[in-house]
Image (tube, rainbow, N blue to C red):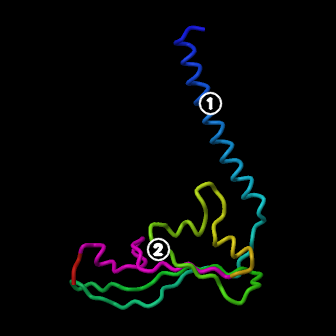
Amino acid sequence: MRPVDQARASRSCGWHASAVAALLALTTGAAEAAEDPPYTLAREGFFYVGGKPVTINGHTYMAGQMYVDFRIPAQQTHPYPIIMVHGGTRSATTYFGTPDGREGWAQYFVRHGYGFAHAMAGKRRAGRSRNRANDLGLSA
């Protein structure tokens, strides 16, 4: 085999090996998730805590509230829920799943009979927990 053909074949094998490895990783993660039976929720939803109306330039916005979402299992075996407040450099999505497809803490605790709540205090995300007027560049 000529050196040029050998290099081309080597690159082709490397690309195919990477594609196969990625496919295996995806199917393995899906297979692991499929092994967990579905769970039943009695209730799930969200609510806001606190906050106060603020009027800026004739428009009223809610400021200072905290967004909370929750899941209550149908078979709740523990009297107190697990409440997590995210912060720092992590996103709340880490409570609901992992990048490789595994379930997150929310599913783990619900499967083990705990109610689960996630509170988003003071984070700028979709205007849920901050003064929307500040996000729009309006000032008091």
Q: Which amino acid does label 2 sit on?
A: Gly
The quarter of the picture where the N terminus appears is top right
Q: In which quarter of the image is residue 121?
A: bottom left
For mark 1, what is the residue? 16
Q: In which quarter of the image is residue 135?
A: bottom left
Element type where label 1 sits in the image? helix
Q: Is residue 98 above or below residue 45?
A: above
In the rendered image, residue 119, in percent from the top left (x then y), is placed at 52, 80
Q: Which amino acid does label 1 sit on?
A: His
| Between marks 1 and 2 in the image, the one whose residue lies nearer the viewer | 2
Q: Residues within 10 Å of mark 1 (few under 14, many from 20)?
A: few
In the rendered image, residue 95, in percent from the top left (x then y), is placed at 58, 69
Q: Does the segment drawn in magenta span residue 32?
A: no
Q: How many labels does the image show?
A: 2
Q: Residue at x 50, y 74 (%)?
A: 86
Q: State the extent of the magenta-drawn residues as a range.
A: 115-137
Q: Residue at x 62, y 26 (%)?
A: 13
In the rendered image, residue 108, in percent from the top left (x then y), is placed at 69, 71
- Left or right: 76 in relation to 140: right
| Disc marking residue 87 | 2
Looking at the image, which is closer to me, 48 or 13?
13
Spatial CA distance of label 1 from label 2 is 40 Å
Q: Residue at x 58, y 56 (%)?
A: 99
Element type where label 2 sits in the image? loop
Question: Which of pointers 1 and 2 lies earlier in the amino acid sequence?
Answer: 1
